[in-house]
Image (cartoon, rainbow, N blue to C red):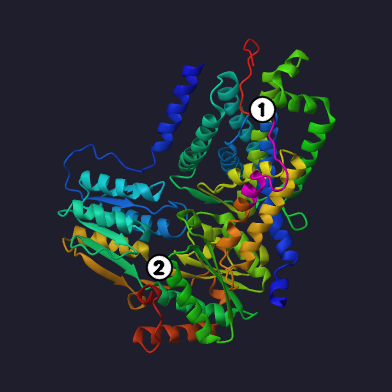
């Protein structure tokens, strides 16, 4: 009896350990490129940051026939293991998704100077690493302007995931956008927590959102991974508005997602793979800003009726001014 | 001052209830198990299994009630596993609980990836959600019902008194003809059922399942049980207090003044205060954590 139980437990744990979605390359030499993608803690299914990065990988697979490897570390401590594993398996580029992977990337990239790496949302100062960073504050400014113009109560909310400088960057851009169109508006700010779990806690997201709605907010922008799914659910329940993040989340609760702050992680992943395929890979910092639609706001059939033509015209005007440099949006990470 | 008073509102009351429900379920679960003499630090893992199975069953069947039932059954099965390990196989109760927590994290992620094409979180569609009765989903009312039942059962019925006797003095219970191990089995399975329901509340409230979404609430529920002096009513009161601390922390965020972390630590500080005996002694069942075998001397 005991032996059986131990066998069963060992099997279950072993299965639980198989977290990668790796396809067997069989060690055979092919002329196909191998791409390793290490996702951020939250993992796939967040309909946001990680899913967007994965979309870039699958698009590259369809287009270039690359061999994709991807892993979902269970905790930050495993990031390094996955990066090293893909580098050792001979991936042509290893892409780390997320700010939290910065230190792990710095270490592993130094161990494999002949290998190519890329990291999203962080700057790693090594010649073989491409740092893919976004001007989130600009996109957040635009959705902030939309929130300010649409809000009936003059109170809007912001809910961040883990309290880190990167998320403060969203918050600050958003707040500036709201105040730009409506100087007297109130912005309520809350964070889900101070650990990585704050990016995958929809219960916390929903209760924080309900609390802000109760205090009079009628639009809430969330930058919180799958925690944000709870915010969108709260907006739907109360008949108010949420603003999506990273990917276009307008479809998640039609009529209740005012817009989404697009951060084209998928484009950046696809582009860096394309660079490798075409032999044009370059290390250093690659910036995705408003002018090349690296960030922006989503407009589609789900939210077209929520935003009037005047608001839209105003937002487009603001966008042009940011691109032209007449409106300066503060970048939290540059000033702190 | 007005700003300060405005914090205390109907909305804070509702938030307190919402925050407390998973703790109430799980601490009642802990009550059953520990009162019968089996330590259950596996509540967290049992909740996680309940959360996942409740969500996945209702996504596949579009019947949230089946999801709730499934969460209770799966929670009970995980409780059964703990019972086999600790009662039949006489494994260390703490170790078995830790294993169940690890199994909860890894197992639900694995099953989630199997069921939802490699993903670690998923949303419930409109048809998969429980209805809202008044201000809450039905599980909220159920939580208070379960506490009432647990109280009446354990203090006013014969099987309930037997359950507590087994946790206090198994040998005395045995000499009275009570089957100690069978009673403990029942208690640990009930514990899993309650924890599973507490876990199921999370996806039905938030509209989605995410990996590791219980985020330590099983442990806070254990603290509530101790704070409530191993009594279901006390544990409920403690859960409400912890829920209140959490709700208060959320309402106060971004208002300036004290940092929210101060309120986040309230449950833990209260537990330490309780354990230090400031609110009177909180003593667990005498035989908790001890295996019982008729042939062995005490």
Answer yes or no: is residue B62 visible.
no
Q: Is residue B255 visible?
A: yes
Tell me the residue at 20%/59% (across/down).
A276
Pointer 1 chain: B
Q: State left or right for residue A38 relative to residue B103.
A: left
Residue at (28% x, 39% y) in the render = A24
Residue B280 lies within the magenta run: yes
- Callout 2: helix, strand or loop? strand
Residue sticking out furthest to the bottom: A326
In which quadrant of the rendered image does the C terminus of chain A lie?
A: bottom left
A19 sits left or right of B139 in the view: left
Q: Are marks 1 and 2 in contact (CB under 8 Å)?
A: no
SS at badge 1: loop
**Mark 1 = which residue?**
B37
> Label 1, label 2: how many angstroms apart (C-alpha)?
54 Å
In the picture of the structure, the residue carrying the numbered disc 2 is: A263
Viewer-closest of A41 and B94? B94
Q: Residue at x 36, y 48 (%)?
A: A77
Q: Magenta part of the protein: which range?
A: B270-287
Nearer mark to the viewer, of 1 and 2: 1
């Amino acid at each position: 009896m005991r032996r059986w139980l131990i066998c069963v437990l060992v099997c279950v744990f072993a299965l639980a350990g198989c977290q990668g979605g790796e396809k067997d390359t069989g060690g055979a030499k092919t002329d196909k490129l191998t791409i390793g993608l290490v996702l951020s803690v939250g993992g796939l299914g967040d309909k946001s940051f990680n899913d967007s990065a994965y979309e870039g990988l699958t698009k590259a697979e369809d287009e270039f026939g690359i061999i994709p490897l991807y892993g979902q570390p269970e905790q930050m401590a495993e990031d390094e293991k996955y990066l090293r594993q893909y580098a050792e398996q001979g991936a042509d580029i290893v892409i780390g998704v997320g700010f939290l992977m910065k230190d792990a990337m710095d270490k592993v990239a130094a161990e494999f100077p002949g290998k190519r790496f890329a990291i999203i949302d962080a700057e790693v100062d090594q010649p073989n690493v491409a740092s893919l960073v976004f001007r989130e504050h600009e996109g957040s400014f635009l959705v902030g302007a939309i929130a300010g113009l649409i809000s009936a109560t003059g109170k809007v909310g912001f809910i961040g995931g883990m309290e880190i400088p990167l998320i403060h960057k969203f918050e600050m851009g958003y707040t500036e956008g709201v105040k730009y169109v409506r100087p007297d508006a109130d912005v309520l700010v809350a964070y889900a927590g101070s650990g990585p779990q704050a990016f995958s806690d929809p219960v916390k997201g929903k209760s924080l959102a309900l609390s802000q709605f109760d205090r009079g907010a009628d639009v809430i922008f969330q930058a919180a991974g799958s925690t944000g799914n709870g915010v969108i659910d709260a907006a739907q329940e109360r008949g108010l508005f949420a603003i999506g993040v990273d990917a276009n989340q307008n479809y998640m609760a039609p009529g209740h997602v005012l817009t989404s702050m697009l951060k084209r992680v998928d484009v950046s992943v696809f582009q860096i793979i394309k660079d490798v395929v075409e032999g044009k890979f370059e290390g250093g910092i690659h910036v995705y800003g408003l002018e090349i639609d690296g960030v922006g706001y989503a407009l589609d059939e789900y939210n077209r009726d929520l935003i009037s033509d005047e608001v839209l015209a105003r937002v487009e005007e603001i966008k042009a001014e940011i691109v032209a440099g007449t409106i300066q949006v503060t970048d939290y990470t540059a000033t702190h | 001052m007005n700003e300060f008073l405005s914090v205390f509102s109907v909305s804070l009351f509702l938030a307190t209830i919402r925050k407390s429900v998973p703790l109430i379920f799980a601490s009642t679960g802990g009550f059953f198990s520990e009162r019968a003499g089996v330590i259950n630090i596996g509540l967290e893992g049992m909740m996680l299994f309940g959360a996942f199975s409740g969500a996945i069953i209702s996504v596949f069947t579009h019947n949230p009630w089946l999801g709730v039932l499934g969460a209770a059954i799966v929670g009970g099965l995980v409780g059964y596993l703990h019972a086999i390990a600790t009662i039949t196989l006489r494994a260390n109760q703490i170790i078995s609980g830790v294993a169940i927590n690890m199994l909860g994290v890894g197992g639900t992620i694995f099953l989630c990836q199997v069921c939802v094409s490699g993903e670690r979180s998923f949303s419930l569609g409109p048809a998969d959600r429980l209805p809202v009765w008044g201000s809450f989903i039905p599980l909220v009312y159920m939580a208070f019902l379960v506490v009432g039942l647990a109280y009446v059962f354990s203090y006013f019925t014969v099987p309930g008194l037997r359950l507590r006797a087994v946790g206090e003095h198994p040998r005395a219970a045995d000499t009275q003809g009570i089957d100690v191990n069978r009673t403990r089995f029942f208690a640990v399975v009930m514990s899993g059922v309650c924890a599973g329901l507490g876990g199921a509340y999370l996806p039905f409230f938030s509209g989605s399942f995410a990996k590791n979404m219980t985020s330590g609430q099983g442990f806070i529920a254990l603290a509530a049980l101790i704070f409530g002096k191993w009594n279901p009513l006390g544990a409920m009161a403690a859960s409400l207090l912890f829920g209140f601390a959490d709700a208060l922390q959320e309402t106060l965020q971004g208002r300036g003044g004290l940092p929210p972390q101060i309120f986040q630590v309230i449950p833990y500080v209260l537990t330490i205060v309780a354990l230090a005996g400031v609110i009177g002694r909180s003593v667990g069942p005498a035989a908790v954590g001890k295996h019982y075998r008729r042939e062995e001397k005490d």
